[in-house]
Image: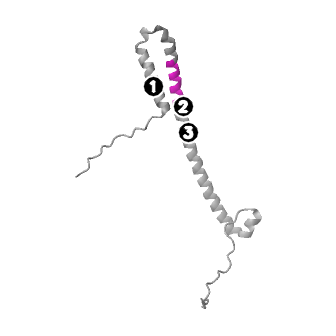
Amino acid sequence: MKKPKQQNLPIVPKKTGRERHRDRLRLMAAQVKAVLAELPHAADLHGELEETLLVLQYLEAEHDLLTAQLVRICRHRNASLEQAEDLSSRLAALLYGTFGRDRLRELGLPVCGGKRGPRPRPSGIAPQVN
């Protein structure tokens, strides 16, 4: 039996609680506007609500812009950190090749690894003679 073919539906992100609350406020303002002629005493409150919703819309747009800017800055910072680590590693290798381990220690630079002595041979195996 064949499986039914899936449709490529667009992915719609779920709304957050704040977005649902904002939508409820916008819906209320729109519904009250329809019956505002019957409620003249509510006109001032409705006007304030409309103004506040416009301010909220502006602040959300500003928030989105700042979030995008923060993401861009974080990516740039991470790329710069990776480049600095690469350059530091290359510079350390150049200094090590030029001056050697002892001179690097005198300069106070970190030196990886240590002197390796002769490796102990397992017992019962004779050393090879060339």
Instruction: Indicate the secondary structure of the residue bearing disc 2.
Output: helix
- As drawn, 10 above or below 121: above
- As drawn, 35 above or below 93: above
Query: Residue 59 is drawn in which quadrant?
Result: top right
Query: Residue 14 is drawn in which quadrant?
Result: top left
**Kind of residue indicated by mark 3:** Gln
Q: Are marks 1 and 3 in contact (CB under 8 Å)?
A: no
What's the CA distance linking mark 1 and mark 3?
Answer: 29 Å
Whole-percent x and y of residue 30?
42, 19
The segment highlighted magenta reads: 49-62
Name the residue: 36% across, 40% down. 10
Does residue 104 appear left or right of residue 120 in this picture?
A: right
Mark 2, residue position: 62
Question: Which of label 1 and label 2 is nearer to you?
Answer: 1
What's the CA distance linking mark 1 and mark 2?
Answer: 21 Å
Does residue 4 appear left or right of residue 48 in this picture?
A: left
Query: Alpha-carbon neighbours of circle 1 within 10 Å: few (<14), some, or many (≥20)?
Result: few
Mark 1, residue position: 24
Q: Which labelled disc corresponds to residue 69? A: 3
Q: Name the N-terminal-most of marks 1 and 2.
A: 1
Query: Alpha-carbon neighbours of circle 2 within 10 Å: few (<14), some, or many (≥20)?
Result: few
**In front here: 76 or 36?**
36
Q: Name the N-terminal-most of marks 3 and 2.
A: 2
Does residue 16 appear left or right of residue 96 in this picture?
A: left
